[in-house]
């Protein structure tokens, strides 16, 4: 049976592990070839262990095991030239670009917004917001030139819709991508390129499940803050991938400019 | 193998338009279908509503897909009729897995001049009708600890529009109802979501009265003349989306792929929603 993305090519940032790897595998299962990248380095303000070059190799292997092609490179979303070079290489190699999953992100906690160190704010905004813009800036011309239309899915968060104490930088970056998405949806509609955001609640990935996060989530306030409506503590990465897949598929051909929470009802409380 | 093999979907307003499209989409993925429709005219509605021949045609089209189909005449304004429909569906098809609360009407008038019957028919059908459908299926879904409900709202459930204040009020109301129900039943393994279409190519908006709404100065506007005015709402340059586009969103929200999506409003609106925060 033909996959829902047969013949398509998807660019995925932050693809070495977690949600990004899951997106790469899920889209490949439906027939897409993949252009994957990840910084594969520790960033100074991030308190948990970030992905490694070995993680990215594992993503490449899992995609290749599905008989799909993949270009996997170490590149930083903050480095526009590097992302442009990757898009150029990927499109030259795989022939086109149809889908972008702007997924790369970091998450840290601070006591409050006014005592946050400047470098914490700046690094989070640079990766989670400016990095999304740079990824899309690199990808969109290739999508427009190809004239095939396309779909962009940006990973925001429940924190992109709601305020939460202790994460003003993260919350601001995730709200910011919604504004970017809504503007791009209007700007890209004439090119039949659709732009949407997904808003996960806590996802079972190394960004959330680690000792650093555990120490912030152990107090009662944080625990209450993290409670979902549906009786499930966290969702799985594949649940986000399924939403990305649907938004990227032809079944959603007239869906653009929307925020799609995959949040087990978290935002309804 | 379909995504919905062995499942039963209940649809209100299934005789034609979006409801029929939902019936065929779900049947093509393996579901048996039960739907109801008023199959009669409501006096304040300025276009011809579905008739029993439409209802029979939907039954035939579902059966052509080798799925079972119950097509019932029921007015969603009357809880007893909706309950009887749900009971019949359960008896004949054995289960209730999904509810698509789709039945709706369209009529026009400014708030300053709207007569109270037009208001009441609208609220009774487009809002209370959704409540009745939820009320009729939820005890079963709660008992079986599973179920999916998707209600049809509209971009008119997120914005204000002149000349259709009663429709807008009903469609905003549907969102409030669905979000509240989502909270109440989440612990029972039931999700409740809303789809918000832009214009959809169905008889409800493809009729002279609706063309006149978009082109008030034209004497007898045609579909061709009205299309650019409809299209002006949508950044993706189409005057309307097709019923199947709404059906695809309904199917996604009822599928296992959407198991953790609840209380949400999903715009299938060709970008009409992009400039709106809702």
Image (cartoon, rainbow, N blue to C red):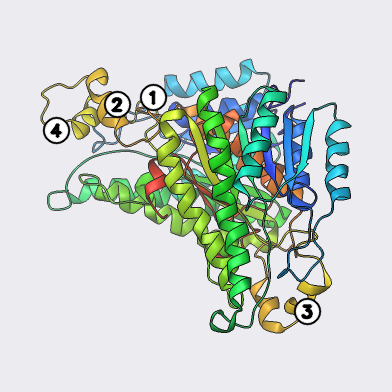
**Distance from label 3 to label 1 (Cα)?**
63 Å
User: Do discs 3 and 4 belong to a common subunit?
Assistant: no
Q: For the residues labelled 2 and 3, say whether their Cβ atoms are less than 8 Å apart.
A: no
**Distance from label 2 to label 3 (Cα)?**
63 Å
Q: Which residue is mark 1?
A: B51
Q: Position of residue A137 (x, y in %)?
A: 53, 42
Q: Which residue is mark 4?
A: B216
Q: Position of residue B188 (x, y in %)?
A: 69, 60
Q: Determine crowd level at label 3: few under 14, some 14-19, many 20+ residues with C-alpha closer than 10 A.
A: few
Q: Determine crowd level at label 1: few under 14, some 14-19, many 20+ residues with C-alpha closer than 10 A.
A: some
User: Do discs 3 and 1 belong to a common subunit?
Assistant: no
Q: Which residue is mark 2?
A: B48
Q: Position of residue A242 (x, y in %)?
A: 69, 42
Q: Chain of mark 4?
A: B
Given residues B234 and B78, the one toward you in this image is B234
Q: For the residues labelled 3 and 1, say whether their Cβ atoms are less than 8 Å apart.
A: no
């Amino acid at each position: 049976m033909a996959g829902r993305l047969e013949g398509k090519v998807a660019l995925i940032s932050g693809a070495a592990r977690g949600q990004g790897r899951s997106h790469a595998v899920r889209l490949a299962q439906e027939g897409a070839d993949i252009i994957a990248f990840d910084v594969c380095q520790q960033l100074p303000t991030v308190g948990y262990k970030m992905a490694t070059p070995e993680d990215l190799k594992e993503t490449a292997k899992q995609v290749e095991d599905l008989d799909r092609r993949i270009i996997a490179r170490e590149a930083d979303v903050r480095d526009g030239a590097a992302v442009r070079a990757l898009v150029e290489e990927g499109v030259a190699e795989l022939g086109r670009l149809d889908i972008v999953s702007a997924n790369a992100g970091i998450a840290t906690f601070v006591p409050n917004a006014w005592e946050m160190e400047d470098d914490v704010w700046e690094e989070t905004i640079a990766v989670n917001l400016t990095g999304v813009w740079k990824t899309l800036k690199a990808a969109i011309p290739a999508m427009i030139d190809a004239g095939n239309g396309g779909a962009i899915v940006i990973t925001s968060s429940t924190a992109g819709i709601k305020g939460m104490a202790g994460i003003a930088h993260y919350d601001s970056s995730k709200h910011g991508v919604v504004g970017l998405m809504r503007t791009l949806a209007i700007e890209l509609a004439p090119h039949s390129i659709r732009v949407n955001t997904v808003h996960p609640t806590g996802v079972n990935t190394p960004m959330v499940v680690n000792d650093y996060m555990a120490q912030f989530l152990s107090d009662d306030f944080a625990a209450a803050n993290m409670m979902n409506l549906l009786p499930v503590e966290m969702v799985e990465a594949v649940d986000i991938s399924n939403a990305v897949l649907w938004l990227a598929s032809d079944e959603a051909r007239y869906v653009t400019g929307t925020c799609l929470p995959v949040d087990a009802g978290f935002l309804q409380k | 193998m379909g995504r919905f093999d062995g499942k039963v979907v209940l649809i209100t307003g299934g005789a034609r338009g979006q409801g029929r499209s939902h019936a065929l989409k779900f049947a093509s993925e393996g579901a048996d279908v039960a739907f109801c429709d008023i199959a009669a005219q409501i006096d304040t509605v300025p276009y011809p509503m579905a008739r029993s021949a439409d209802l029979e045609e939907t039954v035939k089209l579902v059966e052509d897909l080798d799925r079972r189909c119950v097509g019932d005449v029921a007015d969603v304004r009357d809880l007893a009729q909706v309950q009887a429909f749900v009971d019949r569906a359960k008896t004949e098809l054995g289960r209730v897995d999904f509810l698509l609360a789709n039945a709706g009407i369209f009529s026009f008038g400014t708030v300053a001049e709207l007569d109270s019957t037009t208001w009441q028919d609208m609220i009774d059908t487009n809002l209370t009708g959704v409540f009745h459908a939820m009320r009729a299926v939820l005890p079963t879904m709660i008992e079986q600890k599973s179920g999916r409900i998707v209600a049809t709202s509209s971009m008119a459930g997120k914005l204000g529009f002149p000349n259709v204040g009663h429709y807008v009020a009903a469609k905003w109301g549907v969102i409030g109802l669905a979000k509240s129900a989502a909270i109440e039943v989440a612990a029972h393994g039931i999700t409740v979501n809303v789809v918000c279409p832009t214009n959809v190519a169905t008889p409800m908006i493809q009729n002279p009265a609706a063309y006149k709404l978009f082109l008030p100065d034209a004497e007898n506007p045609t579909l061709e003349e009205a299309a650019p005015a409809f299209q002006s709402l949508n950044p993706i340059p189409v005057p309307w989306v097709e019923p199947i586009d709404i059906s695809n969103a309904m199917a996604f929200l009822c599928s296992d792929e959407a198991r953790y999506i609840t209380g949400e409003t999903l715009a299938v609106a060709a970008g009409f929603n992009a400039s709106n925060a809702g």
